[in-house]
Image (spheres, grey):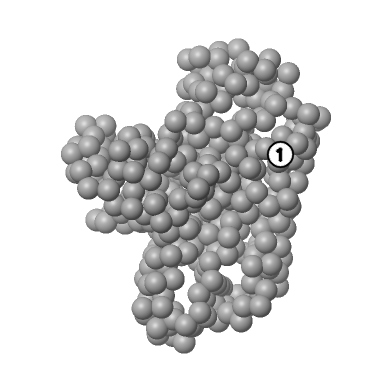
Amino acid sequence: MKGVLLVNLGSPDSPTAKDVKPYLDEFLMDERVIDVPKLLRSFLVRGIILRTRPKKSAEAYSKIWWEEGSPLVVISERFTSKVKERTEMPVVLGMRYGSMTIKNALQELADKGVDDVLLVPLYPHYAMSSFETVVVKTMEEKETHFPNLKITTLPAFYKNPDYIKVLSESIAEGLKGFDYDHILFSYHGIPERHIRKSDPTKFHCKIDGSCCDTNSVAHHTCYRHQCFDTTKKVIAHLGLSEDKVSNSFQSRLPNDPWLKPYTDFEFERFPKEGKKKLAVITAAFVSDCLETLEEIAMEGKEQFEEAGGEQYKHIACLNDSDAWVEVMAKWVNEWQATETLPV
């Protein structure tokens, strides 16, 4: 019997330092998030970061927390329920970090008699700290607790025509009535070394301004290329002016080169160049979360306006929109019927 496992990032159980601390510990101790030797990672995370970060993060979570709970969790649950209504297979939700574990989700599927699972990491782009860690963790749980399960992974869908169409139409709807000077695609940042580590050729990815446009097998696992490609395809689909659209990367850590340009630097730069009406799209995420609702919609707006910006609009993620649900339902139903996966 076939079933579907949707996996998103996760969330602390409450916007309190007490609950944020174990969540951050699990997240930051992941070797694919902070990819340094375990002893050093433990010193950085448990000896330094967790001494101050939980309180600050709890304050940020409290700004965006909904009455029903974490926006990411609530949205993901709504999305799962809607997809479930459009397929005859069991569909369950797990989170990479936090109490809604992948193990529990797999157990739920196994209890329903499922022995053939479609794993859907809810990330459009491949990165070792997002897509890859979901796949690795799921396979670890399978080998340890569910050895008889067959697991097939839905590939990163950053350029899939169905996804580009639904993303583009969502952006177009969000832009209605907004006379923008510029559109910024702000993608989640990752260290530059992650790009090189994910390069199977070990020589293509130089992050030099040209490698992302030069065809290579490395693009299958290159987050930077995939982000840029998503933007290009949305520009083409909507007929946007290329000189009014650009990319940036957010959520970096200090003292470490991450992908550039940095989003907060762009917020400061644009008003000086006369770009005072800005629309921001967070296309690395399919569900609104702390990084979109607090870092971009709130802090980003404040940074832009302090720099002289006049109008600012954050366009919501796809979330549980019916159009996005229909796309996912189409993909999982095609897999059920024909074993076909979207490309």
* Image x and y of residue 81, in percent: 67, 37
Q: Residue shown at 65%/25% (left/top)?
A: 117
Q: Left or right? Give the position of 333 relative to 243.
A: right
What amino acid type should be assigned to the residue bearing mark 1? Val
Residue at screen point 57% across, 19% down = 107
Task: Tell me which residue sits at (67%, 61%) in the image.
Answer: 170
Mark 1 burial class by Cα count in 10 Å: few <14, some 14-19, many 20+: many
Quadrant showing the C terminus:
top right
- In this rendering, the answer to whether 226 lies above or below 17 is below
Residue 197 at x, y = what percent? Answer: 40, 43
Quadrant in the picture for residue 123:
top right
Q: Is residue 12 left or right of residue 149?
A: left
Q: Nearer the viewer, residue 37 or 145?
A: 145
Left or right: where 91 falls relative to 61: right
Q: Position of residue 263 (x, y in %)?
A: 41, 66
Occupied quadrant, residue 300: bottom left
* Residue 17 visible to an observer of this rendering: yes
| Outermost residue to the right | 337
- The extreme bottom residue here reads 274
Q: Which residue is mark 1?
A: 83
Tell me the residue at 34%/38% (across/down).
19
Q: Is residue 89 above or below residue 209?
A: above
Q: How many marks?
A: 1
Task: Determine the secondary structure under disc 1.
Answer: helix
Q: Quadrant of the N terminus?
A: top right
**Is residue 208 visible in this depiction of the protein?**
no
Q: Nearer the viewer, residue 19 or 277?
A: 19
Looking at the image, which is closer to me, 197 or 180? 180
Residue 93 point in image, percent of width and height: 59, 33
**Is residue 302 depicted above or below 21 in this figure?**
below
